[in-house]
Image (cartoon, rainbow, N blue to C red):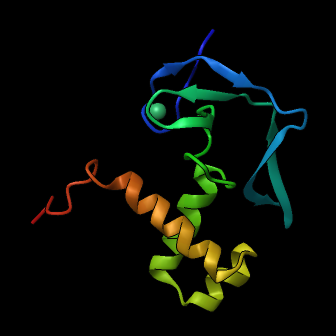
Amino acid sequence: MRSRCPHCEQRCPGYDRPNRPRQWRHLDMGGMRCFVQASVSRIRCPEHGVVTEMVPWARPAANMTRAFDDNVAWLAAHSPATSVCEYARVAWRSVTRIVTRVVDDAVGRTDRLQGL
Ligand SMILES: [Zn+2]
């Protein structure tokens, strides 16, 4: 079965399969950091080159799960920066990247004038 490109969702031929599984930071559980770990392949997309195959739990090129990204982005919109960093246990630079990913993902799918 051919995997999909995370950017264009096109089915692409495999490129290689790294020896080590990848990890994505997930929401903390019981005060402990939680990671999703999986063995994923890299694929060769004609448009985007060699990239890690699409996984349903994370956005392209992200080291965090969608749930973690969404949670941190919501916190960033409603809390001071220092609170977000301390609560999520990430650097402010990571928060900036997360917010950028979430906003890019939402563009075109969200009607910002709905309800006016
Ligand atoms: Zn692609």
Q: Position of residue 49 (x, y in %)?
A: 54, 35
Q: Residue at x 28, y 47 (%)?
A: 109
Left or right for 29, reference 61: right
Left or right, 72 with respect to 102, comes to: right
Q: Judge by depth and name the residue closer to the eye, 44 or 11.
A: 44
Q: Is residue 33 left or right of residue 114?
A: right
Is 62 positioned to the left or the right of 34 in the image?
left
Q: Position of residue 80 (x, y in %)?
A: 54, 90
Asked whether 115 or 68 is in front, the reply is 68
Residue placed furthest toward the top: 1
Find residue 96 and report its horizontal and vertical position in percent. 54, 75
What residue is shown at x 61% (from left), y 37% (from top)?
Answer: 51
**Image quadrant occupied by the C terminus:** bottom left
The answer to whether residue 91 of the structure is visible from this angle is yes
Residue 85 sits in which quadrant? Answer: bottom right
Quick check: 44 above or below 82? above
Residue 83 to residue 21: above or below: below
